[in-house]
């Protein structure tokens, strides 16, 4: 891939301040893009308004700036891109690969088996909705057969979406388009050539590749970084009370992020500011050094003698 065509991205959700797990994804995606002379784009995934925290988007942007991140092009907000999602839904409907569904979550849970990401949809409304019911969601028809791809960190991944997930939702009952759908449209519209993100989204990737195939999009390369967990194995998140990164101690947080990603930053830079750390990282970054693991217990500033 030539430097002029590489386009990477970081796409946080504004559900709270930036924590260490998000910082890892930001650092990895940024360095992978800049090491290849490419562009690094920033997208705020704010479609799920019920989970959005007021002021979180601006807080994330200020934090990234304070840490020394620089992004190319203007920041994209998913909440402003409904016209693109509607157009893509119309395209899929015209190809007869979507169908309305009247099932509630409880009905699905009562009549199916567990899959990779919740209950496997049993196909209740595939051939039409009962006359006594009305549509709640819009689903895509899946087909049997494995979707295979090679992840640059996690290796060969194979998943039969139809058997392991089922016909999944594109538009939710509240009218909001699903994450799996929006991210595919946005990555294609922004010309993203490689997606570097956390391994918690690895199981979602075959669904996204399936949608790319239906829409005629080019499938980008993927690299899923290990996710950071706390000592009891919970993913660092707002729900697990992950602490926000501290811009006043940006250098220490960056050192720990680079260490987490297997880059072996020198101990001499442990107390350095972010400028020399970025200079070192840009000269030494290699995706091949990242551990081929799904999860790693986080080692944050303050968790050891540093």
Image: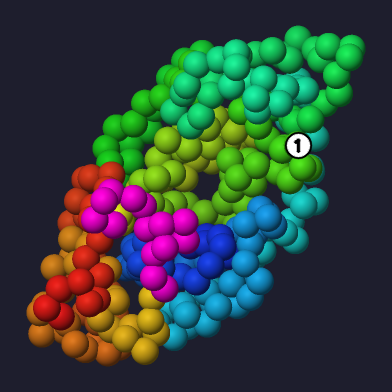
Task: Please state if 100 lies on the left or on the right of 170 as rendered.
Answer: right
Please tell me which residue lies in front, 4 or 296: 296
47 up-or-down from 3: above or below: above
Please tell me which residue lies in front, 107 or 47: 107
65 up-or-down from 30: above or below: below
As for residue 282 lying within the magenta part, the answer is no
Location of mark 1 (residue): 173
As for residue 239 lying within the magenta part, the answer is yes
Which residue corresponds to the image point at 27% horizontal and 37% vertical from the top-left?
Answer: 155
- Residue 257 position, x and y percent, is 27, 68
- Circle 1 packing at 10 Å, graded few (<14), some (14-19), many (20+), is some
- Residue 201 position, x and y percent, is 43, 44
Which quadrant of the figure has residue 263?
Answer: bottom left
**Quarter holding the C terminus?**
bottom left
Task: Please state if 49 lies on the left or on the right of 248 as rendered.
Answer: right
Which quadrant of the figure has residue 81?
Answer: bottom right
- Residue 200 position, x and y percent, is 40, 45
Please tell me which residue lies in front, 236 or 41: 236
Can residue 36 be seen by looking at this rendering? no
Which quadrant of the figure has residue 181?
Answer: top right
Which residue corresponds to the image point at 64% horizontal and 46% vertical from the top-left?
Answer: 182
- Extreme residue toward the right, this view: 131
Q: What range of the chain is rendered magenta? A: 230-244
Secondary element type, mark 1: loop
Task: Please state if 233 lies on the left or on the right of 264 as rendered.
Answer: right
């Amino acid at each position: 891939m030539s430097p002029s065509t590489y386009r990477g991205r970081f796409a946080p959700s504004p559900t709270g301040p930036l924590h260490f797990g998000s910082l890892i994804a930001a650092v990895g995606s940024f360095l992978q893009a800049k090491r290849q002379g490419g562009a690094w784009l920033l997208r705020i995934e704010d479609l799920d308004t019920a989970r959005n925290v007021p002021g979180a988007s601006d807080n994330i942007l200020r934090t990234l700036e304070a840490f020394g991140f620089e992004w190319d092009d203007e920041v994209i907000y998913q909440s402003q891109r409904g016209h693109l999602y509607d157009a893509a839904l119309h395209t899929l409907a015209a190809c007869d690969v979507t169908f309305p569904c009247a099932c509630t979550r409880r009905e699905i849970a009562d009549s199916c088996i567990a899959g990779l990401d919740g209950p496997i949809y049993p196909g209740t409304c595939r051939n039409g909705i009962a006359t006594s019911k009305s549509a709640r969601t819009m689903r895509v028809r899946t087909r049997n057969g494995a979707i295979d791809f090679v992840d640059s960190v996690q290796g060969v991944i194979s998943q039969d979406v139809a058997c392991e997930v089922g016909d999944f939702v594109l538009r939710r009952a509240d009218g909001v388009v699903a994450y799996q759908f929006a991210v595919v449209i946005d990555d294609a519209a922004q010309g993203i050539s490689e997606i570097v993100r956390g391994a918690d989204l690895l199981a979602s990737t075959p669904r996204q590749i399936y949608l790319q195939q239906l829409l005629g999009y080019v499938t980008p390369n993927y690299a899923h970084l290990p996710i950071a967990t706390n000592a009891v194995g919970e993913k660092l998140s707002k729900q697990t009370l992950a602490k926000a990164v501290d811009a006043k101690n940006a250098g220490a947080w960056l050192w720990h992020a680079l260490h987490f990603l297997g880059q072996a930053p020198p101990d001499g830079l442990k107390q350095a500011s972010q400028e020399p750390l970025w200079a070192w990282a840009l000269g030494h970054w290699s995706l091949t050094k990242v551990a081929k693991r799904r999860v790693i217990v986080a080692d944050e500033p303050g968790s050891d003698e540093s």
